[in-house]
Amino acid sequence: MSERITRNEVIHVARLARLSLTDTEIDEFTGQLGDILEHAADVEALDVGDIEPTSLPLPMTNVLRADVRRASLARDEFLTQAPASEAGQFRVPPILGEEP
Amino acid sequence: MSDLHEPALSDEWELVVGLEVHVELATQTKLFCGCANEFSTEPNTNVCPTCLGLPGSLPVMNETAVEFAMRLGRALGCDVHPSVMARKNYFYPDMAKDFQTTQYDQPTNRDGELALADGTVVGIERAHIEEDAGKTTHVGGGGRINDATYSLVDYNRAGVPLVEIVSHPDIRTVEHAKAYVSELRNILLAIAVSDAKMEEGSMRVDANVSVRPVGSDELRTRCELKNINSIRSLGRAIEYEARRHVDLYESGEAPRQETRHWDEDGGRSTAGRSKEDADDYRYFQEPDLVPLAPTAEQVAEIDAAMPVLPAARRARLGALSSVADDVLVTVVERGQDMLALGAIEVGADPDKVLTRIQNDLAVDEWSSVNAETLAVLIQMESVGELSATQAKQVLADMAAGLHGGDPRAIAAFHGFEAMESDALEVLVDQLISDHPDEWTRFTGGDDSDRKKMQGFFTGQIMKATKGQADGRAVAELLGRKSK
């Protein structure tokens, strides 16, 4: 098992992403994620002190649109595709836990 | 419980508060799509594939939202920086995308400050751009989230542009917390980026509260209070929470870092989500949006177009008058300072103008009062053509737009004509000879008698003149005659 990520960290991240993993999968992904982090460590070893960080591959900034209204969707069009709806709203199962 | 005069804490403990204020920007459209940014009673009518998070949809940033955010940043003295958007991941149906697009480690505005009306300065850590979430309604189980049988979601608010203003934990009293929110609201209205209505949710305040022993500069465990819907409620919530912390420490325990829900009716806060795993949101840079890189010219343009801010407006009026600070605060808060300045400019007495506005122009609609007519009114009162009571009545009618808002026409309509002082004197002499016993009690009685008789004679005069005599002139005349 890699030292880069622990089994418990994988379980924690899987829980945050609402993924249910079997014990075998947890072992498998712990190994794979460790390999990925190992590869990142190779990059970390390079001296990049003089290189500007790239935040996005696109050489663009300030892509903006004018504050002008456009038509919204007709409600029936998307509500009929929802698993459940009521009174013009999406109906969802009871929410467990606290609001974000 | 009084939240005005009672100190929140004992002499041994100091309050430490930082505020996070979410402000909805008054743009035409949402932050990333062209859906209308407006309150609608009909749910899910201002939604499209982008704010529903449908596959294949892409966000494009609203130019006006960015400009408003920078204007707000500059009004708070922040530096404007290049920024990138980030995804804050969470699973809750108020965002169909399962993440909120916000700014994380590279916010637009950083390092500002807000000066309160009494001169106290509160540091601003950042003011970043983000999108609002939709609205959930819990059905069954009395509407409480944990007992509901299901929930309904309306995405009209999802994607509405917000700026979140985060203060440093510089606030030490409940009064300062309230003053911070009210001054921030004044600024938002002055720069016209939000309607800033707490009761309607376009301005929402969360308070981070902790306490520490007086003399210490440590920052102890804080709790974040949510669901605060008014400035008064903010004061009560902070006070309650601070006392709770002190009680815990004094009984040998300690608060837990958590979000707490303020219950205004119950006057208490209840425990919510634990805040120990701050990184659980798995922030990462939003790949569908490119960075914002405002130029120095853009920032200079925003600065050049910045209106005079409330603090400077109060100072401007304060320099011309000698009224109390709270009069200046009220007049500027109501946006009546230009009216006052105008009237002062054409020669009206500054203190009289400001006092009259503060006392008698507390109305929503006063557009038919202008600097000239107000100055005429103040002048009429100053020379005794109108009594104080009459001036109040005339101003009310001016605000209501009666008789073209002309104070002379209104005074004439009511038959308000100042009595010549000679006529007044004749009347007073007549009253004295009609009521010799009362006059003796006025001139020779004790203080209580004198006071009663002053009231009697003033009442008789007002009755005889149908309220047109100037109260001050009457008092002066009675005093003179009794010597």
Image (cartoon, helix red, strand yellow):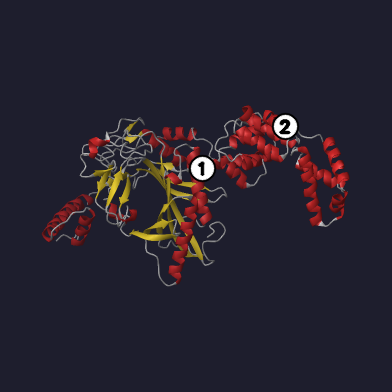
Name the side, left or right, on which B351 lies relative to B134: right
Q: Relative to B198, is B173 above or below?
A: below
Q: Which mark is residue B461?
A: none
How many numbered marks appear? Answer: 2
Residue B376 on image: x %, y %: 69, 31
Q: Secondary structure at mark 1?
A: helix
The residue under the point 41% across, 60% down is B269
Mark 2 or 1, nearer chain start: 1
| Residue B98 versus residue B292 in the image, above or below | below
Q: Position of residue B479 (x, y in %)?
A: 83, 47
Q: Are marks 2 and 1 on the same chain?
A: yes
Mark 1: amino acid: Asn
| Residue with the most extreme left position | A24
The residue pinned by badge 2 equals B415
Q: Which residue of the protein is positioned furthest toward the front in this rendering? A: B434
Q: Nearer the viewer, residue B122 or B51?
A: B51
Q: Are marks 2 and 1 in contact (CB under 8 Å)?
A: no
- At 37% from the left and 64% from the top, the residue drawn is B256
- For disc 1, the neighbor class at 10 Å (few under 14, some 14 to 19, many from 20) is many
With B1 as the anchor, is B316 left or right in this view? right
Q: Quadrant of residue B78?
A: top left
* Residue type of the residue flagged with mark 2: Gly
